[in-house]
Amino acid sequence: MNSNQFIALAPILIIAGAAVVTMLIIAIRRNFVLINCVSACGILLSLLAVGLIWQANPVQATSLIRVDGYALFYTALLLLTGLSVIGLCYDYFKARTGENEELFVLLLTALLGAVVLVSSSHFASFFIGLETLSISLFVLISYTINRQNSLEAAIKYLILSGVSSAFLLFGMALIYAQSGVLDFNGIGRYLMNQKDMNALVLSGVILIIAGVGFKLSLAPFHLWTPDVYEGAPSPITAFIATASKGAVFALLLRYFISAYNYSYLPFLTVLSVIAVLSILIGNLLALLQNNVKRLLAYSSIGHMGYVLVAFIAGGRIAPALVVESVTFYLVTYFITTIGAFGIISVLSTPQIEADDLSFYRGLFWRQPWLATIFTLMLISLAGIPLTAGFIGKFYIFASGADARLWGLLLTVIVGSGLGLYYYLRVVVVMSMNVEATAIEPVEPVQKRMSTTILAVLTLLLLWFGLYPGHLIESILLISNSLK
Amino acid sequence: MIELLGWVPFLPFLGFLILAIAGERLSRRLIPWIGAGSVGISALLTALIGAQFLKGAMPPYRLALGSWMAVDNLSVPFGFYLDPLSMTMLFVVTGVGFLIHVYSAEFMESDPGYARFFAYMNLFVSAMLVLVLADNLVLLYLGWEGVGLGSYLLIGFWYEDPNNGYAARKAFVMTRAGDTSMAIGLFLLFTQLHTFDIQSVMTQATNLWTPGTVLPVAAAALLLGGAVGKSAQLPLQSWLPDAMAGPTPVSALIHAATMVTAGVYLIARTHALFMLAPSVQFAVAVIGAVTLLMAGCSALAQTDIKRILAYSTISQIGYMFLALGVGAWSAAIFHLLTHAFFKALLFLAAGAVILCFHHEHNIFRMGGLRKSMPLAFLSFMIGSAALSGLPFTSGYYSKHEILLAAFEVSPVLWTAGCLGALITGIYSFRLVFVAFFGPQHAQVEKSPGWRMSAPLLLLCILALAGAMLEIPLASVFSALAADENLHELNTVSAITVAAPFIGVLIAGLFYLTGAFSTQRLESLVWIRQIQRFFFSGWGMDAFYNILLVRPFKTIARLNKNDAVDSIYSATAFLSLMFHRLFSSLQTGQVRWYASSMVLGTIVIIAIGWLS
Amino acid sequence: MNGIPLELGLVLSAVLFVLGLIGVMVRRNLIMILMSLEVMLNATGLAFIVAGSRWGQADGQIMFLLILTLAAAEVGVGLGLALQIFHRFQTLDADSVNEMQG
């Protein structure tokens, strides 16, 4: 380890340090606001470190971690996500009784896992990152321990995540048994020298896909998604939906490109089947859903299917374009998803989670600004022009068409059509007459932090929708850093 | 000064925005100040710009506003274009528009939708200004649709009465038919000439196309379709009489002075294209001649004061079309100008009568208003004189020019025009004699205040002397070869001057002195039938009913279950089925979830091995 | 390092893995499910050790250590949750913990 490598690892080290420091401060002085500030400062420091090494050359810091432009971009994205979620958590947990300070420690460790994931270039760091993230999430999901749903969601996620980890590990073991290497580039070299695909390696990669598919809630590994989304506290749901999935997706892309997996048709066939199933099943399940959190869960299944289409296109088009499409889509997906769950978390009170559709009846007349933001988020998820979601979907189509994946694109079209129905259904409910609502007006609690975050997200949504050029330029900088 | 041109349409738009957003929350004293004020400042600006513009040699002035859109090889820069033609229109729209706004401030005072009214009016004025100033066809089309929207909103202003809504829809749908034709015309021009800029379209068309070939004829005919719809000419004229459902100032502004003449403006603006298509240009003349006669006859049979004026508007625009058709471009615009003055005057005076006389529209229940409403009487006398084209009024000069020009081209057209002038004399003075002379049937409720009187007086002066405001348009229409220095044809000229007098005389004999009795005429069955025919506007509504509405209704009834829709309902049904199926798999049982993962993994490994 | 052939080792770990998997799928008691999970994870650990021994590397054993750590952490959290669930639902039957569905 030389100093260069230390500097490259700085963002990760700072997050790890922040987690420890936060934990120690809790032991000394239990103060919700203070802990919130400390953890936010830790993230900001880490972001600063990312900014400082942004221009530097790629560094292979130990054989486990590779810090390049790609890793740094996703690190920054994850850190910003973490920052927004901390902001949402502040308002969400402030009013709740109980010891809520450890929440931030867990958020930081989850973030640490995610950041390790996006820079990992080795199965060991892949695994460690994934598990650091998952185990933190189990506790985060069950954090509101007085809600039965929360507990149920956590135990389901724990068991299923354990099963998926086992699949993943068994897949890794199979590959290791055949190739004798654990780092992505080594596997890539091994595969390049193979003439025929070994059945064990094939099974191994497919088992990895299955394990990752679970984390990404791709069909047919999606069944846990709605229950966990519904049970987890809303800000945490936002984190699961974005940071956890985004990091895993970024890792999968790095693995596929570095380990030379794109050259094998069976993988792409398997992924195509998964993509089609995810798009159709996710969108169909969302159609008549009356619980907004479950609805967003199902829609996220569909969205992961959409990104997978751009991902599969990598079999025929240049990796740089795949990175560009996937990254743009994920950024827009992050913005809209945090926004949507942010709305739910702002509307929730310690007594009720605002996830039933009836809660949103006439929201336009009660809280016009929130309703407007929610509408914008939803139409961005639906991919309607002038929002970032449209550009994202445009990228999916562009890369899919480049790779001539007509069947998959047709599925995307069908899925988008279905999506329009249930997204607009929520908008319609929000604009319904207020007299018909049975819910007594909730006393408006000042949630400045969350509303600020929502406002910023809305601006970003429109900015990237109207002038996508800025974001595209910075993505182009990193799109060639994967080898 | 001229650089401020952009503000002329923008100010009314600003007024619209303020009034639309603040709405009835504004104090009622403030509303007319914003509504009429914005147009007033526009008018002032126009006057200043006009003074500067007319002083010089009047080179066309272009104000680039930027680019509307630039996608690939399609780029639509837009800007304003000021030449004597658009200058004339600017004067009409802002000047007459301002007077009507002032008038409305009193006329609409007690209406609950005061702010809404002015918001719509400002929107309309703004759109109309964009229309006349546009330097490219797309911007012109924006204004064109904008005035259509304004017209629709204002006809249906009193929307509580379903009949008004129906009239608004009728106007909208009928003009839309013309607009569609015009849009296709624009597409044709663009695909052929690759530009939207009006001036380059005209020069390129002149350079590239041979007169009388298919392309210019098709383009001109399609544009004519738009003009015919907007200007209520045959065969799309029947919406205008129904459009009188709107408040009277609206009728004065939109359905007399400005919007309905947009068609005339369009043809004048694109005259180079029409000169390349002589057959279409002749069709314009014929449409004008036939429309002016038909509408004149219909006006004879009406009893509603506003409908008489509406039919007379159609008839007068017919004159303008006649002038365009015979190549007397300047005369057409000149008549547009004078018509705007005297028809606005007539409508506003009619509005005053209606407002002060129990909201009565039927002229036969008025009578003897000469003494009780002297100002309205004066206005009607001057307005009717100008409308009939009696000498020394503004209408005389413009109409005279048109008829002499028509004679140059075809004596038949001239005969139709003279006959029309005679009929004009009859119906306009029938209105005056019936409503203002004879015994008074009821008392006048109130008399108009200064805000209504001042515009009437000003318009009286303009209707008399407006002919002096004629702007030399030779530079715009320099392309045309036919000079307008007409030979002095004494007989023709004399007949042309005499025709309206004969009309007035006939009206006087019937309705003033009672030398002839209408009852005697009406006792004849065929006269009554003709009268009914004229009253219904030559049965155009019934005609359209049979031609379009009924077949459409029949088709709609036949396809009640919507054959095409069944595809979509089947899709919806299938989606629902699958939704139920997949939902039933979400059992909430963690063991089933784990099993499904195992199953899924086995399946994808199998797929991987098999492929 | 040629005591046990690779294939046999992998088959053993696969059998253990499947046993654990079946345990997760058929047992209803949460504790038993967690134990079956342990079996699965250990089976993968065994596979890594077998593979490591084939190549004569320490990597496989290191992976096993990592897996052990994970398993410990996971079971720690899992038992904590099971405790709370027993507290709330008065049962450890995995099938009765299904309030959310649809």
Image (cartoon, coloured by chain):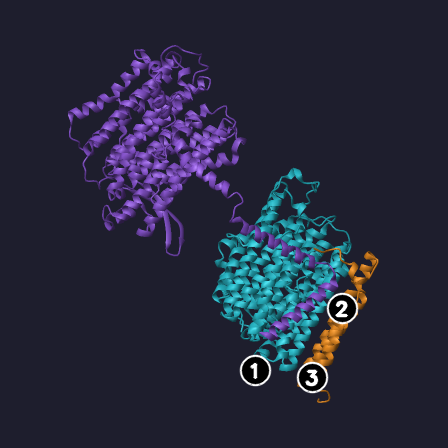
| Chain depicted in purple | B
Which residue occupies 25% across, 19% down?
B501
Q: Secondary structure at mark 1?
A: loop
Tag 3–tag 1 contact (CB < 8 Å): no
Residue A462 point in image, percent of width and height = 53, 52
Do dots 2 and 3 share one subunit?
A: yes
Chain A rendering hue: cyan
Q: Which residue is mark 3?
A: C7
Which residue occupies 65% across, 57% down?
A297
Mark 3 nearby-residue class (10 Å; few <14, some 14–19, many ≥20): few
Q: Which residue is mark 2?
A: C24
Q: Secondary structure at mark 2?
A: helix
Mark 2 nearby-residue class (10 Å; few <14, some 14–19, many ≥20): many
Of marks 2 and 1, the one in the foreground: 2
Along the line of sight, the residue nearer the viewer: A315 or A386: A315
| For marks 2 and 3 on the same chain, the one whose residue lies earlier in the sequence | 3
Q: Does residue B74 appear in this view?
A: yes
Tell me how many marks there are: 3
Estimate the spatial distance between the alpha carbons at disc 2 and disc 3, rounded to whole Å.
Answer: 25 Å
Tag 2–tag 3 contact (CB < 8 Å): no
Above-or-below relation of A211 to B408:
below
Chain C rendering hue: orange
